[in-house]
Amino acid sequence: MNPAAAMAPGTPLTPRLVAEGLAVAFDGRTVLGDASLAVRPGAIAVLEGPSGCGKSTFLRMLAGLTEPLRGRRLLDGEDALAMRPEVWRRRVAYVFQQPPMFDGTVADNLRAGPKLAGRSLAKADVEALARRVGLDAALLDRAARSLSGGEQMRVAIARALANDPGVLLLDEPTAALDPASAATVLGLVRDLAGEGVSVVVVTHSREHAEALGGTRYVVADGRIDPRPEDPCTP
Amino acid sequence: MHPLSIPFSRLGLAAGLVVVAMLLSRREALGLERELAVGALRAAVQLIVIGYVLLLLISHEHWASVALALAAMLGTAAVTAARRVEHGPSARVLAPRALVAIGAAALVALVPVFACIVRPSPWFDARYVVPIGGMMFSSAMNVVAQVFERIFAQAHAEAATVEQWLALGATPRQALASVVRAALRAAMIPTINGLVTVGLVALPGMMTGQILSGAAPEQAVRYQIVVMYQLVAVAAVAGALSAMFATRLLFTSRSQLRRRW
């Protein structure tokens, strides 16, 4: 059986990532009260909503960087709390809105994740990662911080992919990019989903949400709901 | 040789030196006059009192009174090192950890020296144990204060990078490694500089004091060498322990960076 076909969105597979009734509060103010989401392998979930509605906080909880007050997070049926946080985070990769570049070259950055686990990536692996995100191999020896915003975003995605995660969480990946770089990154995200990676994207741009083509959700009133069909949308 | 003594009347004259600093502070509008006056007075009172305490300890030799004096010094050092840091936990949380770091560092530096190198008799002889212990506490106190200050400030300033490491599967220790390394290096450097320049620029206080009070310079120098080596161990142990405590405080049990205190 063709694995790509089996992983295409819409096929009745068990979800890879499940969030059930997540709640979080800051300084006594409830940001999310009952947020749930399920994402199948190869599917893209797009979260939209006004700023301050808790989209990023929800993503941070999925990444294990913020602890929910209530609720469960499951990866392939396994509870986050049953896993060491480092293991969870290698499998559920999180790319920040403005991902910090580490000291050193682009190649150093791509090697960072596996190195933490005691693995060193061969040159060919690093080049393959760069190809996967459409980074020119000539950039690998450049200082990561000298790259443009769009290039840095692709370095950040490649750096996350180096751990071979099953889930990719992206927080406003196009917010700081010019239209051309944004289009490249959106295409890259679709390709990764095509390879079977489950993707959760937070965006406030309706245009980018449409370009991603996944299932769209609205984050509001502390909940996550499927986006109602809007007949007026062109 | 008998050392030249300083009567109280002439000690008062020395206060004129502080007045020089206060006049300059006023002229340059530094606003430090009050601090200088209070500091100078506190230093004099504290030293005069500790002089009598030492006299008492030396004349009524008992291990318990020496232990009590050391405990008071250690407690004061811990409370001073654990002053409230910005973007970090309260002094109440830091103080017990500072106590352990300073205490352990001093033990590592003091026990082998008094057991094998200086060997006072009795072993708790206040003449040796109190001043050398005090130097160790004081050095450890500065290292701990600096390590706490730097680690909490840097972890706050570089929170995004620390969390980026966590997101890639780093353990808290790995995520904070560069912050800890910078803090420890900065805390060790004054001690290392001290090793390199001692005798060329400054004659250390203890050695100078011994020579002024009539000890043979050659013996005073040997004491100073031992003390300087002790200070190296103190800086390393106090730094490593306080960095470990700071790292533990900075992360939750689920390895998340704490941003609120």
Image: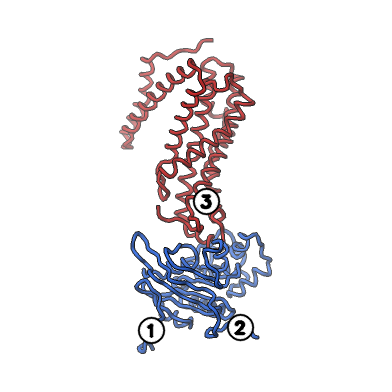
Chain colours: A blue, B red
Q: Which quarter of the rendered picture does the N terminus of chain A lie within?
A: bottom right
Residue A11: percent from left, percent from top:
55, 85
**Relative vertical location of residue B82 with respect to residue B58 in this rendering, above or below:** below
Numbered circles on residues, count = 3
> Can I make out residue B141 in this image?
yes
Q: Chain of mark 1?
A: A
Residue A92: percent from left, percent from top:
54, 69
> Can I make out residue A97 in this image?
no
- Which class describes the residues within 10 Å of circle 1: few (<14), some (14-19), or many (20+)? few
Residue type pointed to by label 1? Pro
Report the side of A94 relative to A139 (left or right). left
Q: CA distance from mark 1 to mark 2?
A: 29 Å
Residue A118: percent from left, percent from top:
65, 59
The residue beneath circle 2 is: A4
Disc number placed over residue A228 in the picture, else none: 1
Residue type pointed to by label 3? Val
Q: Chain of mark 2?
A: A
Which comes sooner in the sequence, label 1 or label 2? 2
Q: Residue at x 38, y 73 (%)?
A: A223
Residue type pointed to by label 2? Ala
**Relative vertical location of residue B22 with respect to residue A47 in this rendering, above or below:** above
Is the Cβ of the residue at disc 1 closer than 8 Å to that at disc 3? Answer: no
Residue B203: percent from left, percent from top:
54, 26
- Which class describes the residues within 10 Å of circle 2: few (<14), some (14-19), or many (20+)? few
The residue beneath circle 3 is: B179
Callout 2: SS: helix
